[in-house]
Amino acid sequence: MPLMRKKIIAAVILAAMGFILGYSSIKALAQTEDLPTVEVEATKTGRAEDGYLTENVQNVGPWNSMSLQNAPYSITILSKEFLDNAVGNSVNQFIKVMPNATTSSVFYNNTYTYTQTRGFDNAVALDGVRVTNSGLTTEIMDRVEIINGLTGFLYGGGYIGGLTNYVLKRPTSERYNSVTIGNAGGSQYYAQADFGGPFDKDNKFGYRINAFHSNGETVYKDLDVERSSIYGAFDWNITEKIKLQLDFLHAKYHQDNQPGSFFLLTWQNGIYQYPVKPENGKAYGQKWNFIDSETNSWGAKITWDINDIFTARASFRQRNFEWENMMSANRFSLAGDGKFAVNTTWSGPVTEKSTGGNFFIEAKFDTFGVKQTLTAGYSANKVESYAHQINFGSYGYTPDIYDQHNYHFDYFPSMIPQRYSDWGPLYKRNKNIFENWIIGDEIKFNDWLTVMAGVNRVKLTTRNYNVAGQTTASYEKWKASPSFSLIVNPIPTLSIYGTYIEALEAGTTVADDPSRFINAGEVLPPEVSEQYEFGVKYTLNDRLLLSAAYFSIDRVNDLTKYYPNGMEEITQDGREIHKGFEFSAVGKITDRLTVLGGATVFQSTLKKMTDKSLEGKHPYQSPTKMFKAYFEYDTPFVEGLTLNGGLYYMGKQYTDNNNQETTDPYTLVDLGARFVTNIKDVKTIFRFSVFNLTDECYWQRGYAGQLGEGRSFVFSVTTEF
């Protein structure tokens, strides 16, 4: 039976079930007397005293805000208080504790940040508007929300692993002032000031100003990082029904000695093998490596409650990210003796312009006693990359003489490249546009049955250009994709759901690195992916949310071929199927014990492969098993003292197409404490943590040869007044 026919039949069956159940429930509801009014407690917003439990999730595509328990998606939220108490000022540190997510980013690198869920990379949004994953600045974030799995209906085409939405800090209704000083490991000292409140007594105008600066050597010798940012947010309640929100950011980042990645692995007997892991405390980069970047962005949002039925909202965001870097790639010897050579590459100044926005109009009404929320709108994101004529270079490999014991930063000073005074003319090298027209309906038949259904029409456009402005590669594709969810609430604290969703995924653009890729710069065509998800969520004693989900994702497979000469080629071949289970828990186990944790186990399999020897093999993208548990304990013997700790297990990763080699699984342990007191009537918070207590040495991203971060000691002191 053709795939499309199967989808239509499945959708019809699910819809029929929903309407049959709905009709029965409407009849039952009509015969039921009105229940007495029940007083509801204040909504939980992720405070430490509530176990960091957040009851509502913001900006779920067209659905706007919705109950976390009743959302038909697997979602995790890290609140502002958790972000503060985690004592980490990098996205990697926050993602590490996410129950069902992992990161594949290089430590101490803000150029691009990758979050993975269900074995795939995630898209990124700021306050619900799609942006690129570059230049993320953690100190301006109020919360982090991760939606696992396909989000094509919610946010348009793109990554299918999920979406990470960074919610920005907003003005506070009451005066808020805080100052923090701390150390992020090594001699990286930092200071942060965060001020907010209303301008007037009527709360018509509000402000939020956040300033941050850090500088110093990290836990890795000769690896220095300096970064600073200034952020402002302003709210204007124009009328009781119209609200305008504005924000801006200016941030700079400089890093000396970017860590070296082990891109090319040992070729032996037709597979790539890993030698002994290099040692912690060494970045394995060159002293002259660096990253310079600057981020400038601004955003606006307006909300208009037109009347009791209609609400309109629109958002716009623009980000300019400029960067330049020089890095080292380390290639293991083909002899398999654990030694490696060093290659230095540089990237000239690049400007990435990201422009995005959305407009939605929402109507809430009753139809014969059935509550409906109908939403229609449009969202878009355009990313343009500009580079100079001279924008990339490589200085070749040294001899295979290094190993983890005799490595020297300055062995080959003749490789120190000279930065150009004239990079040549600036030109637009590529453009990517995601457009999404959408209509969706939330139909609440009664207190225990809800159906959410909709369809979106996505347009993906990609263009690559040369210096002369000529198009060298392109595609443009339209696709209408359905989404359907059925949510059942047998009791108020329990929800059971099933969701089907499709997404048009942009094809991979092969890195424009002819020294590494045979097909450098090629744009692979877009393909449709689909996902089935079934889950259950239960709130225990109004303070602990337990969630479990089964998922099945079907997408085109990107196959990376490795050749004995060290070259690579990325093509599309076959289908990649990910099926598995997720579990998470967040909230209070007891009055004093908090948990944020979970587990993921999934099976990834290749199907319909041209090379039948790869049929049934597992792609090497991320660990297929992970377990995470973060705990806090409010001690009874010292008022204000909280102990915390985390245990994070990552399973093995395959490193070759034939699944003959894997990286070792690893476990990270964190320990820390927080003490809250008043000093001369000023609330003061002391925080201390040890990340990677056992100094575990591990491959963070096995197939790309990226090392994990070693042990670090961090602390901070915050005053709120």
Image (tube, rainbow, N blue to C red):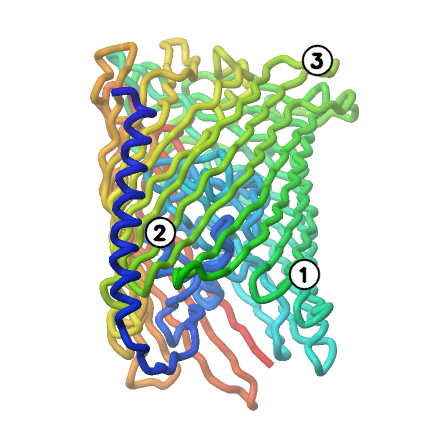
Q: Position of residue 608 (x, y in %)?
A: 27, 16
Instruction: Residue at 43% x, 13% y: name it.
Output: 567
Amino acid tagged 1: Gln
The residue identified by callout 2 is 451
Query: Whole-Å distance between the Cαs marked 1 and 2?
Result: 32 Å
Residue 245, numbered circle: 1
Residue 365 image offset from top left, x and y in percent: 49, 61
Quarter of the rendering occupied by the C terminus: bottom right
Q: Is residue 213 above or below residue 205?
A: above
Label 1 packing within 10 angstroms: few (<14), some (14-19), many (20+): many
C-beta proximity under 8 Å, tags 3 and 2: no
- Where disc 1 sits, the SS reads strand
> How far apart in space, not on screen, are marks 3 and 2 (Cα)?
48 Å
| Residue 694 visible in the picture | no
Q: In this orientation, which residue lies closer to the viewer: 179 or 318?
A: 318
Which numbered disc, 3 or 2, marks the residue that appears first in the sequence? Answer: 2
Within 10 angstroms of label 2, few (less than 14), some, or many (20 or more) residues?
many
Considering only vertical position in the picture, is 322 above or below 423? below
Which amino acid is tagged 2?
Val
Task: Compare residues 81 and 491 and report the one nearer the observer.
Answer: 491
- Give the distance between the C-alpha atoms of the residues marked 3 and 1, in whole angstroms: 40 Å
- Few, some or many C-alpha atoms within 10 Å of disc 3 (few <14, some 14-19, many ≥20)? few
First along the sequence among labels 3 and 1: 1
Per the image, label 3 sits on a secondary structure element best described as: loop
Of the image marks 1 and 2, the number of the one nearer the N terminus:
1
Q: Which mark is residue 470?
A: 3
Q: Nearer the viewer, mark 3 or mark 1?
A: 1
Q: In front: mark 3 or mark 2?
A: 2
* Label 1–label 2 contact, CB within 8 A: no
